[in-house]
Amino acid sequence: MSKRGVWRKLGITVIGLIVVLAIATPLVLSLPPFGGEVVGARLARAHANPHYSDRAFVNPLPPASYTWDDAKNLFKGQFFGHEVREPPSAIPVVSVAPASLRAAAPNPGLRAFWIGHASLYVELDGVRLLFDPVFSDHASPFAFGPKRFHAPPIALAELPPIDAVLITHDHYDHLDMRTIEQLARRSEGTLFIVPLGIGAHLERWGVAPARIRELEWGQQQTVDAVRIVSTPARHYSGRRLGDRNATLWTSWSVLGARHRFFVSGDTGYSEHFKAIGEQFGPFDLAFVKIGAYGPGAPWLDIHMSAEDAVRAATDVRAKRLFPEHWGTFNLAFHAWDEPIRRTLAAARALGLEVVTPRVGEIVDADAPFASSAWWESVR
């Protein structure tokens, strides 16, 4: 074949690939895991929100823009980093006995356990709550992608009836279609309390609109006598091409008769923590993300460092820090156990108590907790 013929064949192949991608991409992005679209009354609410501009939600304090050096560092970190990003042996998991949860939840009282990453089970004054539940094996729209390091401490089907499921934002490691579908089928009494816009995803996955409560910052929902307030976070959202920041993100301040707790969600550090602490603190427990940070200011502005996580916990006036968002998925360019080591060092300097439960280990706000450096045995 002549040189001209080779180039002609190559050109036809490239054009063919472009055509296939042009047809396949919209079809793939229309699949259910990518969620719904914010339209109609939801879009009208978004337009009226003070943090919505130019067809997207925005942070009051915008994150830094990426520079060429940031891009190079991300490339180097992704392909040439030498950190031990996955545990070299099994992470210890404490199995939760279903019967222990089906008994009446303490009222008043506050207890919780870590399901892994940002997924939490919390009981407050007899109300059972799930935060960002991901029971699937992968933090992905498909059955591949970042795979969890450990099993959940209890099967989703073995959980007691859940009063409310709360979501901080719509990224795959926080909002999992398969988990939501199962929770929607399990109990008709479960409410789904989410930031504005995420109801579009839930409705597409079979959650009845009457069970969905979409909140904006400063709005609240009461479940029995427990008050749940949407409070600010510094992050972003999106599940597919073209929907970046179409839905809101949030932290949660949850207030009971005698106890209260805070869930940071994914966020960068800013003055919003002090404002939350002044308005709703002190908190008996603060569930704060400590992992999946850096390198570079643009990342740290939306995924704070472990040291900033400790500052955040002190700003919200937390009596105890319960670290989360680490130890389950490989999502960043640091060693898998680096976040907890840095968190403990920073907390010691500020005199902040940190609880370090194993996955599934119950923490009671009214009782001492015997923390252990369990990650040291994962070698």
Image: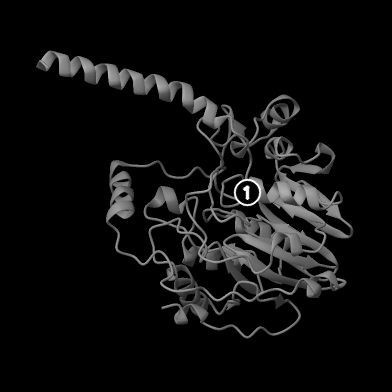
**Quadrant (top left, top right, bottom left, bottom right) of the C terminus:** bottom left
* Residue pointed to by mark 1: 176
| Quarter assignment of residue 96 | bottom right
Residue 11 percent location from the top left of the image: 25, 17
Is 372 located above or below residue 133 in the figure? Answer: below
Is 199 located above or below residue 310 in the figure? Answer: above
**Which residue is drawn at the image coordinates 73% and 50% (left, top)?**
182
Q: Inspect the image, locate mark 1, and give the three-letter code of the amino acid beneath it.
A: Asp
**Which residue is drawn at the image coordinates 70% and 45% (left, top)?**
217
**Which residue is drawn at the image coordinates 50% and 59% (left, top)?**
329
In the visual, does 342 lie left or right of 43? Answer: left
**Which residue is drawn at the image coordinates 66% and 35% (left, top)?**
50
Residue 107 percent location from the top left of the image: 87, 72
Residue 275 percent location from the top left of the image: 65, 56
**Foreground of the two, 290 or 360:** 360
**Quadrant (top left, top right, bottom left, bottom right) of the N terminus:** top left
| Quarter assignment of residue 86 | bottom left
Element class at badge 1: loop
Can residue 85 be seen at all in this image of the molecule?
yes
Can residue 317 be seen at all in this image of the molecule?
no
In the visual, does 27 lie left or right of 203? Answer: left
